[in-house]
């Protein structure tokens, strides 16, 4: 049995007779994944064009007269979205992961995201998939599809993993041990 880490308190969420076997958090700080090989160039093109557009419109001679305000205001949402895609999503994701906790009990999988608790019966998991990363962390997917086109949050989980609707342990340390722990209790 793996000793639970004392970093989180799941005790108030445990059912009578339920035992906590493991708890942890996702990797902290900024993370880059294989998806970013596509997302970073796209965000740089989007953001670069938005910066170019706004710089051009705001530096026009006679700015502020007549219809120029429409073009100035039109570009601002695209600029904000571009800055979020280039830099903001990494900071936002890191901030969300600080309040994300995972636990495995002898009966359930628990994911605590701020005040929201998600619980899955360990004996009825639809899937258990392990993906290991080069930095020694790993992701265990337990349910759902985390693709850009199927997320119920309109793809934000694809850009910002902490917003994903997929039930997963994202970038945890010692993923093989946790994976084997889940498998052994799912089969029991």
Image: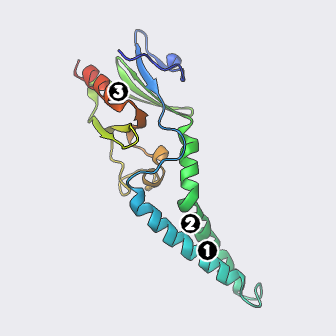
In the displayed structure image, the side of residue 82 where residue 165 appears, left or right: left
Depth order, front residue of 92/107: 92
Q: Quadrant of the N terminus?
A: top left
Q: Indicate the colouring scheme.
A: rainbow
The image quadrant that residue 37 belongs to is bottom left
Query: Which label's residue is closer to the chain start, 2 or 1?
Result: 1
Circles 2 and 1, Cβ within 8 Å, touching? The answer is yes
Q: Which residue is mark 2?
A: 82
Residue 164 shows in the view:
yes
- The answer to which image quadrant residue 171 occupies is top left
Q: Which residue is mark 1?
A: 51
Other-residue count near label 3 (Cα within 10 Å), few / some / many at <14 / 14–19 / ≥20:
many
Query: Where's residue 13, x and y in %?
Result: 49, 20
The circle drawn on residue 178 is: 3
Give the mark, 2 or 3, whose residue is nearer the N terminus.
Answer: 2
Q: Is residue 116 above or below residue 146?
A: above
């Amino acid at each position: 049995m793996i000793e639970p880490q004392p970093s989180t308190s799941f005790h108030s969420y445990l059912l009578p007779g339920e035992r906590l076997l493991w708890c942890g958090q996702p990797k902290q700080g900024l993370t880059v994944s294989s998806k970013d090989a596509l997302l970073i160039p796209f965000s740089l093109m989007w953001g670069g064009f938005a910066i170019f557009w706004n710089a051009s419109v705001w530096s026009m001679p006679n700015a502020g007269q007549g219809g120029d305000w429409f073009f100035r205001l039109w570009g601002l949402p695209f600029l904000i979205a571009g800055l979020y895609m280039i830099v903001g999503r990494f900071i936002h994701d890191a901030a969300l992961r600080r309040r994300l906790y995972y636990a495995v009990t002898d009966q359930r999988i628990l994911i605590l995201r701020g005040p929201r608790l998600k619980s899955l019966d360990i004996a009825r998991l639809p899937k258990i998939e392990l993906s290991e990363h080069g930095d020694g962390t790993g992701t265990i997917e337990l349910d759902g599809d985390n693709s850009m086109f199927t997320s119920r949050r309109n793809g934000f989980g694809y850009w910002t993993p902490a917003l994903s609707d997929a039930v997963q342990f994202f970038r945890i340390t010692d993923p093989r041990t946790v994976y084997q722990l889940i498998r052994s209790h799912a089969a029991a």
